[in-house]
Image (cartoon, rainbow, N blue to C red):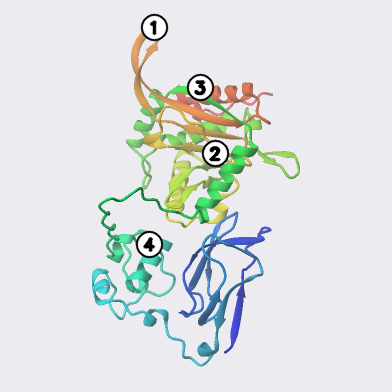
Amino acid sequence: MSQFVFKMPDLGEGTVDAEIVAWHTKPGDAVTEDQLIVEVMTDKAAVEVPAPVTGRVISITGAPGDKVAVGSPLIVFDTAEATAGAVTPPAALEPAPPAAAAAVAALPANAARSGRVMTSPANRRRAREAGIDLATVVGSGPNGRILRDDLGVPPKAAPAAAAAAGPETSEIKVIGMRRLIAERMSEAKRNIPHFAYVEEVDVTELESLRSHLNSAPPPGAGALSYLPLVVMALTRVLESFPQCNVLYDAARGVLVRHRAVHVGIAAQTPDGLKVPVVRNAGSLGLWEVAAEIRRLAERARTGKSTRDELVGSTITITSLGKLGGIASTPIINAPEVAIIGLNKAVERPVVLNGAVAVRRIMNLSSSFDHRFVDGYDAAAMIQALKELLEHPATIFIPKVKSK
């Protein structure tokens, strides 16, 4: 037996350990070099780790949720069979049952997919349980990504309830992205003295402008939402309120004020909340901002975001869209000092110029770090943002610099 001990790699930027999210192999399995063996997560990003050699798995270290130190043994391979050319491909160890194979939209026998198969960890597990070789499955998702329906595996039926069944519970281990979100939210809420400021905004004119622009978009552009317009307005406002475009370096006790505005856009994904970053938003045009938001949101939803696309924001915008409600109290995305929340826009009767009129109203629900942003400055900033959104043409008028 010739053993190869693969240790937890150094994943960069001072990482000392990584959490096991999901194993894609087990002792006894034969794997080939570059085959995905485990998914891990650091405090910075999720990482897929490929096999460094071809061989058979002897042992693995850690279960999902466990942390393994950098440099500690992660997985041990027996490479003797690989050297002799006798390693059996993984697909041959567990042939697919005829019923499962018949349910999958398969590639022709001579057209098996080469290279990395794109799908979620859950779908990899379903494929393993059903004995399906993912290399033979036609993916209907973006760029051939394999979706659950492509596997043809029906959901597991729930067991019939007993005649006198009592309360049922289930335990879900908090690991991976959900653990990271939980830790960051807890840390932010525990360490940052939040204060909230809610203001209603008449977005009737903003809606009119949005509808007009959507009637004749540039070639290839998607429909505008409020979000890129708010981003554009926010970049203008922060020119006068630079104290809100700040990161707090707690280790050094220093506020790092940024000239450029890097706007984090909170996006809900199947893996939880992610915040991709529109960099240098103030240097982009409206349609460029809209395109970048769509691109980043799609990459976040499909799990394709790079680490660089998810770090470095200086202020965050969060929106619940149609579920936006009347008001919310968003948690600051540390180490930032402010977050702007968009609530649902609805038509309401309001008093306008002494008469009742129907106007489209949307609330801005924002949170600030009271250690570094005074209440007056926060209110003044939101009022300035409200002014631009209520008179949206002014968003695009160059600011006159004082001599």
**CA–CA distance in space, label 3 to label 1:** 20 Å
**CA–CA distance in space, label 3 to label 2:** 20 Å
**CA–CA distance in space, label 3 to label 4:** 43 Å
Q: Are marks 2 and 4 in contact (CB under 8 Å)?
A: no
Is the residue 163 above or below the residue 347 in the image?
Answer: below
Q: Residue at x 39, y 51 (%)?
A: 169
**Residue 157 image offset from top left, x and y in percent:** 27, 59
Q: Nearer the viewer, mark 3 or mark 2?
A: 2
Label 2 belongs to which residue?
A: 316
Q: Earlier in the sequence, mark 3 or mark 4?
A: 4
**Residue 371 image offset from top left, x and y in percent:** 68, 31
- Point out the image quarter for the C terminus: top right
Q: Are marks 3 and 1 in contact (CB under 8 Å)?
A: no
Is the residue 111 above or below the residue 160 in the image?
Answer: below
> What residue type is disc 1 on?
Gly
Q: Say the numbered circle drawn on residue 143.
A: 4
> What residue type is disc 4 on?
Asn
Q: Residue at x 36, y 79 (%)?
A: 94
Q: Say the numbered circle drawn on residue 387.
A: 3
Residue furthest to the top in view is 354
Question: What secondary structure is marked by label 4?
Answer: helix
**Residue 48 image offset from top left, x and y in percent:** 52, 65
